[in-house]
Image (cartoon, rainbow, N blue to C red):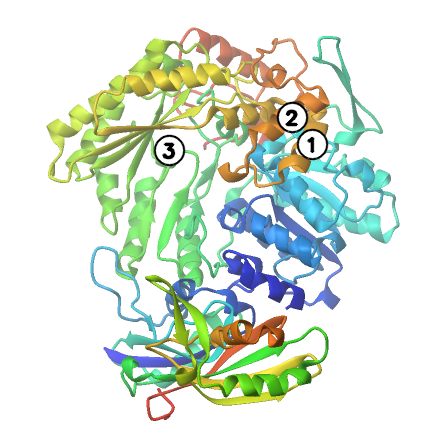
Amino acid sequence: MDQRLERILPKVQKPARYTGGEYGEIMKNKAEVDLRFALCFPDTYEIGMSNLGLRILYGVLNQMEGVWCERVFEPWRDMAEEMKTAGIPLYALESGDPVRNFDILGFSVGYEMSYLGILDMLDLAGIPLRSAERTELKPLVFAGGTCMYNPEPIADFIDLAVIGEGEEADAELCLLYRRARDEGWTKAAFLKAAAQIPGVYVPSLYDVSYHADRTIAAITPKDGAPAAVTKRIIQNLDESYFPSKTIVPSTEIVHDRTVLELFRGCIRGCRFCQAGYVYRPIRRKSKDLLLKQAFEALSDSGYEEISLSSLSTSDYRELDGLCDGLLEWCEPRKVSLSLPSLRADNFSMELMKKVQKVRKSGLTFAPEAGSQRMRDVINKNVTEEDILNSCRTAFEGGWSAVKLYFMMGLPGETDEDILAISDLAFKVLQCWKKYATNKNRGVRITVSTSCFVPKPMTPFQWEGQNTMEEFRRKQQLLKDNMRSKAISYSWHDSTVSFIEAVLALGDRRLGPVLESVFRRSGGLAAWEEFFSEEAWNAAFTEKGVDPAFYANREKGEDELLPWSIIKTGVSEAHLKRERVLSREARTTPDCRTRCAGCGARTLSREGKCDD
Amino acid sequence: MIKCRILFEKVGRAKYVSHLDLMRTFQHSFIRAGIRIKHTEGFNPHPYISIALPLQLGCESLCELLDIQLEDGDVIETIPERLNPWLPEGVRALSAAPPVGRVGQLRRVRCAAELIYDDGNAAARLDGLQELFARPNLIIEKKTKRGVGELDLAPHIGDVKLKAVTETVLRLEAVVSAMEPTVNPSNLTDAVTRNAPALAPDFARYRRLEVYDAEMRVFR
């Protein structure tokens, strides 16, 4: 180990996250690889190592001949300071080699607030922040992940973005890079060629012009770049890579367990949910393969907990059989099974009992809105009766703690809708009083509200976000109207949500703002202790950018949106139809009941969706 | 159940794995290795393991002891070879045998410190350090559950050996008290920093070498 590193590690919190050397990490002989790939996660080790996507890409890239993919995370502030003082540039965990000497840096970006983390990591690596300042092919800096459905806010910093699922596109990029390097292409030549890979978006190949009112006038491709970049999907999940053998961290991470992905996509069509739209079409894995992979992954990791992952676990067609098969293996081995993302409408006693057999976890329901009208506006398709029935089932089954998640600031929301949250929580309390089998332990009902952030690629992409003042007024209103001490209420800070909306809905004019905020307050902005409202305000003022233009303004349906080049397969016509229905508080049935004709099916080679 | 005590080392990058994290790492590793061990009772059962003397973060060791209980019929001696492929880098089982002594009988630890002097003049500190460790009193600050107190190390350190290894490195070896009080290897440099600041190294590495009972018999 680098002696300089050895000297600073005793001074920082949780040094094990900076050393690598965990069970399952992939070490390669440097003499036998010709492409060094830094898989970068712009947040801490504990968050990044909990990300299944990162583990999948790590495995996929390391399967490639001649490629060594290593992990890089954003160090906590204490470590970053020590590294700067000691003159240690950002390094990869496996080899300890400086990231700036790698061929490719691929950032996985799932949360807008981690944009500053990208800048932080580039800066710590000693790599120029702006793509234009990096004139050589090496190192190539790109980003993928859910945020890249609107990559424009970070257009200045990345050389390209991979839109959609990265398993295949990342590998294709590596092959093209290798060819470009071996044949001595310029960076410009490489980017021009990369833009021809399906799903690759090269921001510098698009000129953006603006109207006097600051809206976008035109986005003009050049050098043969495509006029539309359609996201990549994996056609057949059963044939795709699953990390049965994966890294088991030697220090505690956020989700320290085996994660089994059941399917991608969601049949529900909740109108606020970006994931629900961008992961279409629905592709599931077969039950028997899942069981096989679960047993392999549990055996190889030694984990004693397995969690099923998807956008809506209860919609997996063979969930009962899957759970039975898992429990049959898990129970004698004392492995517990957790089922997040269950819907309140089909939450069954039987399923709950099954899960309870090994270990009992807390229950969380997400009605998202308090009133039926509002739930219809967002197409949640859950009724109050569903929620209360599920709570009754839970209380009868011995649960005594229920969390209820809601969003505030949904389109068309009134104070009545806010107060309905309090009413619903009170009804849940009454339900407990009526049906709880064990009242001695008391009940804990926790209501949490987040601030709605309109997201690209959803029917609400044109909506303006409530102002921070409006959010605070609504939070106070709800707080004043909570009807029992057994119900506790917590809420998200509206300032962070406002910045999230600016970044989610923003365009490339935010580049200078991001850089200015980074220079003022550093990275790790997703962490409350490092989020600086002052830094953001100062940066907006300095760069002459009005954040409300992005966050609070309702956009015209004929307006050219910053992410117009990017296509998810879901047609804009479908989004507009859904928006009209939402304004009439009319629901759209789930995709299994009736196909809504969103268009995502066209991405499947066989035209399949939720088969 | 068969009582089993594993002697293991923890070196290299693994020295930054904390005591609690190491326990969890072993729990996972036994499962990976298919070695079935006794679980704790109760609502949330997990593999029962016990490590004799928690090792300070950042300190290496060649003599850690871990107690488990194997299922009847298991063969103790094969544990290292079955377990080692499943452990993270730097953690390695050296041997396994039925426990000889009770953990409470573990009284002394031989440890080593590499004292590093960046000016390349390590040997110049040799005499001063010899004198320092021969003093009748060697007070250090010691954090306890009740706060910061003072401890006289002198009665709890013995068999001090000092040697210049290279121009920048001095090797300090000593036998220290393992329990009541617990003397950590880093306390040796704490004593230097507090009582002879001019001799304090720029950096130090620590390692436990062997554990003993009260009569200085190797403890297993």
Residue marked by disc 1: A516
Q: Residue at (68%, 26%) from the top-left corner?
A: A510
Going by the image, does A351 lie left or right of A23?
A: left
Q: Residue at (19%, 33%) from the top-left corner?
A: A393
| Above or below, B40 relative to A321 | below
B160 vs A597, nearest the viewer: B160
Q: Distance between the residues labelled 1 and 2?
A: 8 Å
- Chain of the residue that carries numbered disc 3 in the rendered image: A
Query: Residue A327 appears at what percent x and percent y?
Result: 29, 52
Q: Residues within 10 Å of mark 3 (few under 14, many from 20)?
A: some
> Which one is in front in this view, the residue at disc 1 or the one at disc 3?
1
Residue A99 image label: none
Residue marked by disc 3: A315
Q: How crowded is mark 1: few (under 14 residues within 10 Å), some or many (20 or more)?
A: some
Q: Do labels 1 and 3 share a chain?
A: yes
Q: How far apart are marks 3 and 2 (CA)?
A: 46 Å
Q: Distance between the residues labelled 1 and 3?
A: 44 Å
Residue A538 image label: 2
* Secondary element type, mark 1: helix
Label 1 close to label 2 by CB (< 8 Å): yes
Q: In which quarter of the image is the N terminus of chain A?
A: bottom right
Q: Which amino acid does label 1 sit on?
A: Ser
N-terminal-most mark, 1 or 3: 3
- Chain of the residue that carries numbered disc 2 in the rendered image: A
Q: Residue at (71%, 82%) from the top-left corner?
A: B167
Q: In which quarter of the image is the C terminus of chain A?
A: top left
